[in-house]
Amino acid sequence: MSDNSYDTTTDLNPSSSCLGFDDFCNLLMPYGALNSPAELHGLLCGKLCGGAKLTRDDWLQAAWEFLDLTDTPDGQAQDEVAMLLDVTMQQLTSGMYDMQLLLPENDTDLDQRTQALAEWCHGFLGGFGTAGIDPDKTFTSDAADALRDMAAIVQAAVSDEEDEEEQEKDYSDLIEYVRMAAMHFYAEHHINEDDLPTVH
């Protein structure tokens, strides 16, 4: 693997204590979460990349509504979901193009990882569409293509016609494409420092 290859593991930020995909699932399961951590992170990224300015309270309210929980979390669950905002913002504003997607570990079955990536893209499109973008805004052809591609990835499934190595490569390529597209959207909507989302 080359130095430029993307690591598709779940660790959003090695220097943070942000939970991985499986731990997030276990944390939210008791509250009856209807959507996966991947889709939740996609929603967050979609809102931020669409220009939304989110405070901690804004994000938590949006997260609880999206997950359609039977009970409102407090304690660790609240702290971890809030940290998801902090870590994602750190990555988006670092200038290093190092944002990572919250997805299952690489040793998870490929079908499940592909489904999680589809859910991430579904969440992103939903968040992007509700971020308050000017309805008259005209996207570049590349941006419009990226949105159409993400919509296509929502329907992604593992092909039986490819061998395992090709499938893994296709999966890694899709992740790299999606994360780069998301970061380009963020850069497009936050050219000036004054436009950066507010995080408390």
Image: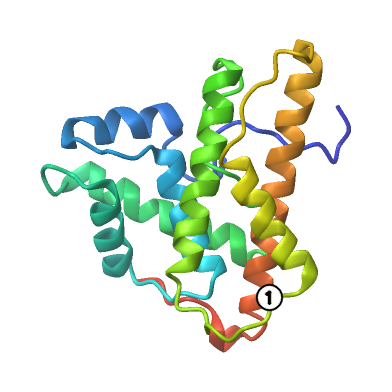
> What residue is rendered at 25% in x and 43% in y?
77
> What residue is rendered at 61% in x and 27% in y?
157
How far across and how far down the image is residue 143, in percent?
72, 66
Q: Quadrant of the N terminus?
A: top right
Colouring method of the image: rainbow
Closer to us: 124 or 106: 124
Relative side of 60 to 49, left or right:
left
Quarter location, residue 25: top left
Closer to us: 57 or 152: 152
Q: Quadrant of the C terminus?
A: bottom left
> What residue is rendered at 30% in x and 55% in y?
63
Relative side of 46 to 79, left or right:
right
Relative side of 45 to 57, left or right:
right
How far across and how far down the image is residue 107, in percent?
59, 15
Does residue 66 sit above or below 30 in this rendering?
A: below
Quarter location, residue 9: top right
How far across and how far down the image is residue 78, in percent?
24, 50
Can you identify the residue that label 1 sits on? 188
Closer to us: 137 or 69: 137
- Mark 1, Cα crowd under 10 Å, few <14 / some 14-19 / many 20+, is some
Look at the image and tell me whether residue 17 can be seen. no
What secondary structure is found at the residue carrying circle 1? helix
Does residue 28 sit above or below 99 in this rendering?
A: above
Look at the image and tell me whether residue 70 can be seen. yes
> What residue is rendered at 51% in x and 33% in y?
116
Q: Residue furthest right?
A: 2
